Amino acid sequence: MTAICSAPLTRTLLAAGLAFAGTIASFSATVTPAHAGAAGYTAKLSTALEAPKQKVVNDVLWRCSGDSCSAPVDGARPVNTCAKVVKAFGPVTSFATPKGELSAEDLQRCNAAA
């Protein structure tokens, strides 16, 4: 009689264990922090800053240290964001997005707009 009752109990416990493991795995995936700079903008300043500086540009916090700046993507056109970064921190020698770097022409427009 014990053997008959243990089979459904084993299946139930197995199903409950798998459900619990799936819940933990999906929770872990949603609370894992994004890596800084992995999917954002980066800029290289023409002149290094004397001290680290932070400023909100296009509703996104930009962090600069030395001649390097970075921030998450803000949704605006990269050339427009670049021009605002130049106004906030100074001319740039490069400006990169998750899709690649701005062309020399776009970089020139960016620096000229500021």
Image (spheres, helix red, strand yellow):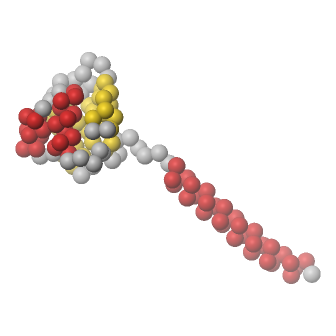
Quadrant that contains the N terminus: bottom right
Is 13 on the left-hand or right-hand side of 34? right
Quarter where residue 67 is shown: top left
Q: Residue at x 21, y 34 (%)?
A: 85
Q: Relative to the observer, which residue lies in front, 58 or 38? A: 58
Image spot of residue 110 (x, y percent): 12, 38
Q: Residue at x 74, y 74 (%)?
A: 11
Q: Relative to the observer, which residue lies in front, 40 or 57? A: 57
* Residue at the far right in the pictured view: 1
Q: Residue at x 20, y 35 (%)?
A: 84
Above or below residue 59? Residue 26 is below
Is 85 on the left-hand or right-hand side of 60? left
* Residue at the far front in the pictured view: 59
Quarter where residue 56 is shown: top left
Is 105 on the left-hand or right-hand side of 74? left
Is 2 on the left-hand or right-hand side of 9? right
Image spot of residue 48 (x, y percent): 22, 23
Is residue 104 among the parts visible in the rendering?
no
Image spot of residue 80 (x, y percent): 17, 42
Quadrant that contains the C terminus: top left
Q: Residue at x 71, y 67 (%)?
A: 16
Image spot of residue 101 (x, y percent): 19, 46
Above or below residue 19? Residue 106 is above
- Label total for image: 0
Above or below residue 72? Residue 48 is above
Quarter where residue 82 is shown: top left
Q: Relative to the observer, which residue lies in front, 85 or 49? A: 85
Is residue 20 among the parts visible in the rendering?
yes
